[in-house]
Amino acid sequence: MLLDLLFGITINLTVMAVHVGATLVVMEISDVIIPTSRTSSSRRRHLMLMIAVVACMLLAHLCEVGIWSLVYLALGIVSNAADAYFSAFTVYTALGVGHSVEREYARLLEPMTATSGILMFGWTTAVLIAALQRGVRRTL
């Protein structure tokens, strides 16, 4: 059980590294898109910023699900890549907790995957709000 938890923590840290990278990209994007003074196009730029942030963070989530799906596939929890991605996605989003991972040797992976998704969605929300606040502060 302890090894399972350590393995799950290791995968969670890998997922967090992807999210750190996406957060850094968002910070760079916000510096390019946000206007530095009030202009007639500042609302348009804020909208473009939010679309870019959402797209970047969505891409990060899709990659993170991919990491979990590789784990599911490597451990033989599912038989093919499509099922692995689907299973990881349903658990990551906490939609399918209790349905995907039925192997006793991998029982802890399901709650670790769900925990990963919950943490990353919370982080994404914080990034979205921070980007918007940063944009508003720079245009005041």
Image: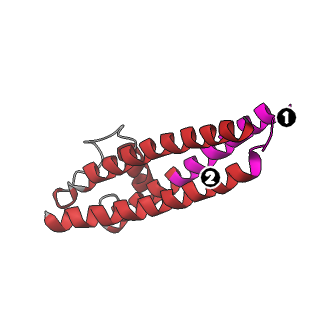
Q: Position of residue 100 (x, y in %)?
A: 30, 47
Compared with residue 19, is residue 119 higher up or lower down, i.e. above or below?
above
Residue under the image location 62 percent in, 52 percent down: 26
Magenta run includes residue 15: no
**In this view, the mark in front (1 or 2):** 1
Q: Secondary structure at mark 2?
A: helix
Nearer to me, 70 or 113: 113
Res. 76 image quadrant: bottom left
Which residue is most to the left? 1
Magenta-colored stretch includes residue 35:
yes
Say what amino acid the circle numbered 1 marks. Answer: Thr
Q: Quadrant of the N terminus?
A: bottom left
Determine if residue 44 is in view.
Answer: yes
Identify the disc placed on residue 121: none
Nearer to me, 135 or 123:
135
**Drawn side of residue 60 relative to residue 39, left or right:** left
Q: Amino acid at mark 2?
A: Val
Q: Which residues are magenta?
A: 32-60
Q: Main secondary structure of the magenta part?
A: helix
Numbered label tally: 2
Tell me what residue is drawn at x 40 percent, y 42 percent: 93
Per the rendering, the mark at residue 26 is 2
Give the camera-side residue of 19 and 64: 19
Q: Quadrant of residue 4?
A: bottom left
Q: Quadrant of the C terminus?
A: top right
The label shown at residue 39 is: 1
Residue 80 seen in render? no
Q: Position of residue 18 (x, y in %)?
A: 49, 61
